[in-house]
Image (tube, grey):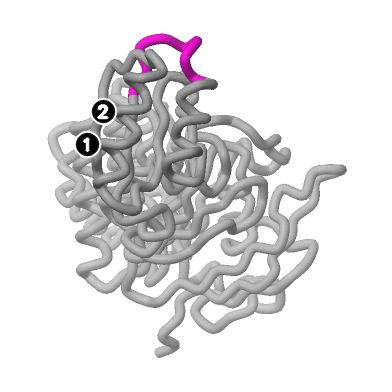
Amino acid sequence: MNTNAIEAQGLVKIFGDNRAVDGVDLTVRTGTVYGVLGPNGAGKTTTIRMLATLLRPDGGEARVLGYDVVRDAAAVRSLIGVTGQYASVDETLSATENLVVFGRLLGLSSRAARAKAAELLEEFSLTEAAKRPLRDYSGGMRRRLDLAASLIARPPLIFLDEPTTGLDPRTRNQMWDTIRRLVADGSTVLLTTQYLDEADQLADRIAVIDRGKVVAEGTADELKATVGAQSLQVGLAESGDLGTALSLVQQVFGTAGTVAPEGLRITVPVPHAEAVADLLVRFREASVAIDSVSLDKPSLDEVFLTLTGHAADDDTAPAGPASDHTEKVNA
């Protein structure tokens, strides 16, 4: 078996004047979770749709499990499952009826489709609600059913496009456990997310994408190491002190660091702990009022701020027309 589930070089997709995807390279090893991290409109969904053969690339090339996504589209579709941002199930049908319909569309006999539906409903803790129409389901239950539908054929490669968007923390953790179980059972997962903690928790490797480009790639620890061994976070009591504080941080650390969206928290990599004491003394001498101080290992939040200059949940890039919805593909 090819050790790489996905190999993409220079993928481009253009919608009018917008280069939604602008030269994306990805290499995803089989049996891993690969995270694609970025804000809404960064190009994550468009990239997935090209890899899943739902959009034809305007440039570059990609192979999925050894098959070219353009020349061998049918073969690619037979090997993948896709769960998009929005449920693609029928709200007027029950969970069992939805899964049986998907099973029949995928070529299963009536008996086999019902057996597979029962198996998946049990796996996703939906058995008790199996006969209820989906309009009575919570958002978390719908997301679990949508993922279950993608797994009817047990594809070796699964695309999950922001699978936990809008879920409560408990349901989100359940989805994380499901994703871990899928990989433990031999699947490969490409996961797009704008939640930094989700990528940190699940992904073996992470590509940070912003405005259609991959701006960094590596393990979570490798990405954090680009920011520094430790980071200092200083919360200011007064927004009027921001300019003075940034100037003093620049003097001490050689960089002004990054400023959180609310403008009252400065994050800066720390080369050595002694410099922190020096900065605090200068703040006191300049009458800069401090609300909080912490010295932490860097998080993916700091990585994203450092790489892009804005937070991961900022909607900073226009979305192409195809990035506003997704479709399910199974075979």
| Secondary-structure class at tag 2 | strand
- Going by the numbered disc 2, the residue's amino acid type is Val
Whether 272 is drawn above or below 221: the answer is above
Q: Nearer the viewer, residue 26 or 150?
A: 26
Instruction: Tell me which residue sits at (36%, 19%) in the image.
Output: 285
How far, Cα to Cα, is label 2 from label 1?
51 Å
Whether 103 is drawn above or below 277: the answer is below
58 is within the stretch colored magenta: no
As drawn, the label of residue 293 is: 2
- Going by the numbered disc 1, the residue's amino acid type is Ala
Residue 153 seen in the figure: no
Instruction: Tell me which residue sits at (33%, 33%) in the image.
Output: 233
Mark 1, residue position: 130
Residue range corresponding to the magenta coloring: 235-242
Quarter-wise, where is residue 152 in the image? bottom left
241 is within the stretch colored magenta: yes
Q: Nearer the viewer, residue 114 or 195?
A: 195
Please tell me which of labels 2 and 1 falls first in the chain.
Answer: 1
| Secondary-structure class at tag 1 | loop
Instruction: Tell me which residue sits at (46%, 31%) in the image.
Output: 248
Q: Nearer the viewer, residue 60 or 276?
A: 276
Report x, y in % for residue 227. 41, 53
Residue 264 seen in the figure: yes
